[in-house]
Amino acid sequence: MKDVFKIGVIGCGDISTRNYVPNIMDRFSNMEIYALCDLNRERAESLAAAHGIAHVLSLDEIFEDPEIDVILNLTNPQVHYELNMRALRSGKHVYSEKPLGLNLKEASDTIALAKEKNLYVGCAPDVFLGAGVQTCRKVIEDGLIGDILSAKVANMYHGPENIHPAPDFFYKIGAGPMLDIGPYGISEMLYFMGPAEELCCYGGIGINPRPIKDHYTDVEVNTHYNGIVKFADGRCASVNFSWDTWGAENGPCVQVYGTKGSLFLSDPDNYGEGSRVHVLLEEDMRDDNGKISREKTSHSGEYKKDIPLVFDCPTENRGLGLCEMIEAIKEGRPSRANGEFACHVTEVLDGFNIAIATGKPYKMQTTFQQISRMPEDFVSKMR
Ligand SMILES: NC(=O)c1ccc[n+]([C@@H]2O[C@H](COP(=O)([O-])OP(=O)(O)OC[C@H]3O[C@@H](n4cnc5c(N)ncnc54)[C@H](O)[C@@H]3O)[C@@H](O)[C@H]2O)c1
C-alpha cells in the first residue's frame, strides 16, 4: 500500500482556507493535496496558488480522477450527503466535515454504501482525538474519578454571526447550534460514556427573523435546546445548547461526574495547547481527620487540580481524523473518527430536533463500537 495518500478537496471556503489546507500541507506526512475544487472556481484557484497545489478540478473531474484516493468534503452541510455518496460511488474513500448527514437516513445510507464498496468513511469532528479530550479519557480509564454516573455538555452564547464572513447559513436547515456546535460536545460525551439509548428535549427558536450584520435572515432551525440523553445502563447526561443567550455561566463545556470526583474540559473545540483539563476529587474535600469538610465542599472550585495533557498537540489540528483514517486504511483496522460513530452522533443531533417537534422521547436506533485512545506519540510521529 502507498505511504502517502492523494487527497481531493471539495470546498475551499472558510474552514478549508483557514485550517484544513494549511494543516495538511504542513503537519501530516501521510497525505498530500492533489487537487482542489469549489463551485466558486476562483476561490479554489487562489487557494491552490497560495499553497502551490497543482490541480484545480471541476466536480466531475475530481470524482473521475484515478490519482485521488480520498475525497475531503469541506462543503456546506446541505450537500455533504450528495457529495459523499458520489465520492463513494466513484470508488474513493471519504472524509467529511460534520455533520455526516442532515438526518439518520442520510448518515446511515452513507455508511451502508461505504460498507458495500469496502471503502472508509470518516467524519469531523476529530477534536476528540486531540490532547485535551484524550487526557480526559485517560483520567476516566485510570479510575481517577471513579465510576461515571452522569455528565453535562453546555455551550450557550449569542450565535456565530460575528465570527464568520458569510454567516446566514448558520440559521438554515443543516445548521443551528445542534448541528453546528453540537457535534463537538456530543461526540466527546459519547466517547466518554458510550452509545445513547433515548433522548428528551425541549427548545425552539428564540429570535426570528435574526439580525445579522446589516440585514435580517429567516431562521429555519431551532436555536435553543434543553435536552437529556439516557444511556443503556440508565445513566444520563444533560445537554444545553443555545444561540439565544447573551452568554451563560456555563462553566467548563464538558463535565463528567464520577463516584470519586468530577472532570472538567474547558473547550470542546480545542485539540491541545490551550485546552484545560481539571479534576475535583473527593479525597481533596476531606479535612485532616479524614472527614468531608463543609468548608472545602462549599469552596470546592478552589480545590480543582490541573491535569497535564497526555501529548503535545496544536490548539487547532483539523485533519487529524483524516490522517488517522489513512493509517487505519494502511493497517486494515477501523478508523477512530469513523462513519459508524458519526452516524450515531448524527442520530443524536437530529433526535433532539425530533423530540422537540413531537414533544416525546426519541428512541435511538443506531449504536457504535467503543473507540480506543490515541497512541500518545501519534501526532508527533505524523509530522
Ligand atoms: N468555518 C468554521 O469555523 C467551521 C468550523 C468547523 C467546521 N466547519 C464545517 O466546515 C464545513 C464548511 O464550512 P465553512 O465555514 O468553510 O463554509 P463556507 O461557506 O465558508 O465554505 C464552503 C465552500 O463549499 C463550496 N461548495 C458548496 N457546495 C459545493 C458543491 N456542491 N461543490 C463544490 N463546492 C461547493 C462553497 O462554494 C464554499 O466555498 C461545514 O460543514 C461546517 O460545519 C466550519
Image (cartoon, grey):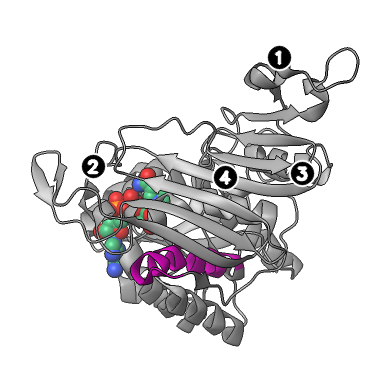
Q: How many marks?
A: 4
- Report the residue that reaches farthest toward the right: 289
Pick the front one: 150 or 33: 150
- The answer, for residue 218, to whether it is visible in the render is yes
Sequence-wise first label, 2 or 4: 4
Q: In the image, what residue occupies the spot 41% across and 72% down?
A: 103
- Residue 345 in the magenta stretch? The answer is yes
Horizontal side of 175 relative to 366 (left or right) equals left
Check whether the beta carbons of the residues at disc 2 and disc 4 lie within 8 A of each other. Answer: no
- Rounded to the nearest whole Å, what is the CA distance between mark 1 and mark 4? 25 Å
Of labels 1 and 4, the one closer to you: 1
Above or below 116: residue 19: above
Q: x, y (%) of residue 203?
A: 35, 55
Q: Nearer the viewer, residue 368 or 319?
A: 368
What predominant SS class does the magenta segment belong to?
A: helix
Q: Which mark is residue 295?
A: 1
Look at label 1 and name its amino acid: Glu
Left or right, 135 with respect to 320, comes to: right
In the rendered structure, does residue 12 fall within the stretch colored magenta?
A: no
Residue 82 relative to residue 240: left or right: left
Earlier sequence position, callout 3 versus callout 1: 3
Foreground disc of the pair 3, 1: 1
Which stretch did the figure color magenta? 341-360
Instruction: Locate the N terminus by quadrant.
Output: bottom right
| Residue under pointer 4 | 152
Q: Disc 3 or disc 4, which is closer to the eye?
A: 4
Name the residue that disc number 2 marks. 165
Which residue is depicted at the point 65% across and 19% down?
A: 298
